[in-house]
Structure formats: structure tokens, C-alpha cells
């Protein structure tokens, strides 16, 4: 008598492996997407910290984001605007704006050039990413009349030099 597997046993093993693969592969892909979302949120927080540190030490913003941070950008990064790298996709755009005598410089995050594709919806739905994209600061608008009271409004963005605490 020969020892080995029958054809039926081999078919059952292949079917079981196929079922396991059908369940495991989507879960692995979802875990990878979640990891990229957290990685993007962390990169956004690092970018705010880097630019704030640069501004505090130099008393001005550089003319290019790459000169103030080591965070990776994709696509055409020019001046103070760039697309952050999220698994090679442009999910988040960052813009730094110089301050005025009345207001600090500001960093704003918005949906990137490829914000509707691939991994981006999951990244943009991440709590920490949402929190950074919807952050506001108090903008002071001086009164045009002498002795008038300036107005304060909430504007989108993160004031450079402000405390940024993000929970991951």
C-alpha cells in the first residue's frame, strides 16, 4: 500500500487555503492602510514641529518647505506649498503662510491632489489627520479707525509656534 494524499484530500486542502486567503488578504490590506494613515498623521505632526522650530530659531520662514523639514513630499513641491507623501500618493497638501505684525505664520492642511484615490479616503478619515486639518487659530484684524477695537476671528490653520498635541 502506498502512503500519500489522495486527490480528494489535496482538493480539500486547496479549498481551505483559498478560504483562509480570501479572509486574510483584505484584513492585511486594511491594516496596511490604517498604518499609512497613522504614519501620515505622525508626519503632519512632525512637519508642524519642524517648521515651528525653524521659525523660532530663524525668526522667519524659509522660502521652501524642504529647507525647514525632513518630511517627504511628492509631486511638485514649490515654495511653501507641497503634497505630503502617503504611500506615494498625494493625499494631504500643506501650505505655510508668512505672518504679519498682528498674526503669526500659519500652517494649513487640506485634501491633496489625489485625495479621492486609492488609500486617501482612509487616511483623510483618520482622527488625528482630521484634527490637524480642521485646527483653527485666533486671527486678529486691526481696526481701520484710530482707537478702535480689533476684531478676532477663528481661521483655519495651525499658528506656527503654538503647542500641537496629537493623540495617535
Image (cartoon, grey):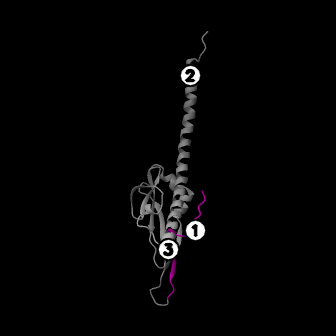
Callout 2: SS: helix
Quarter in which the C terminus is drawn: bottom right
Q: Return the residue nearer the eye: 79 or 146.
A: 79
Q: Which residues are magenta?
A: 148-168
Q: CA distance from mark 2 to mark 3?
A: 69 Å
- Residue 116 in sight here: no
> In the rendered view, would you say 161 is above or below 33?
below
> In the rendered view, would you say 58 is above or below 11?
below
> In the rendered view, would you say 49 is above or below 114?
below
Q: Where does the image place residue 48, in percent across and percent down from the top left?
A: 52, 64
Q: Mark 2 against mark 3, which lies toward the viewer?
A: 3
The residue where tag 3 is placed is: 104
The residue where tag 2 is placed is: 10
The residue where tag 1 is placed is: 163
Instruction: Name the residue: 54% across, 57% down.
Output: 42
Q: Return the residue nearer the eye: 25 or 51.
A: 51
Q: Count of labels shown?
A: 3
Q: CA distance from mark 2 to mark 1?
A: 61 Å
Q: CA distance from mark 3 to mark 1?
A: 13 Å
Q: Could you classify mark 1 by the number of other residues whose Cα lies within 10 Å: few (under 14), some (14-19), or many (20 or more)? A: few
Q: Could you classify mark 3 by the number of other residues whose Cα lies within 10 Å: few (under 14), some (14-19), or many (20 or more)? A: some
Q: Where does the image place residue 76, in percent across and percent down from the top left?
A: 38, 57
Horizontal side of 147 relative to 75 (left or right) equals right
Q: Where does the image place residue 63, in percent across and percent down from the top left?
A: 40, 67
Earlier in the chain: of badge 3 and badge 1, it is 3
Earlier in the chain: of badge 2 and badge 1, it is 2
Amino acid at each position: 500500500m502506498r502512503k500519500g494524499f489522495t486527490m480528494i484530500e489535496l482538493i480539500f486542502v486547496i479549498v481551505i487555503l483559498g478560504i483562509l486567503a480570501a479572509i486574510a488578504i483584505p484584513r492585511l490590506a486594511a491594516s496596511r492602510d490604517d498604518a499609512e494613515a497613522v504614519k501620515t498623521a505622525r508626519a503632519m505632526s512632525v512637519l508642524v514641529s519642524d517648521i515651528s522650530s525653524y521659525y523660532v530659531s530663524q525668526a522667519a520662514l524659509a522660502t521652501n518647505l524642504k529647507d525647514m523639514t525632513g518630511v517627504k513630499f511628492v509631486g511638485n513641491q514649490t515654495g511653501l506649498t507641497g503634497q505630503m507623501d502617503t504611500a506615494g500618493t498625494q493625499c494631504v497638501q500643506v501650505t505655510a503662510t508668512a505672518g504679519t505684525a498682528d498674526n503669526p505664520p500659519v500652517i494649513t492642511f487640506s485634501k491633496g491632489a489625489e485625495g479621492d484615490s486609492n488609500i486617501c479616503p482612509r487616511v483623510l478619515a483618520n482622527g488625528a489627520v482630521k484634527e490637524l486639518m480642521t485646527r483653527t487659530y485666533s486671527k486678529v484684524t486691526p481696526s481701520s479707525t484710530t482707537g478702535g477695537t480689533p476684531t478676532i476671528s477663528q481661521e483655519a490653520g495651525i499658528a506656527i509656534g503654538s503647542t500641537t498635541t496629537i493623540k495617535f
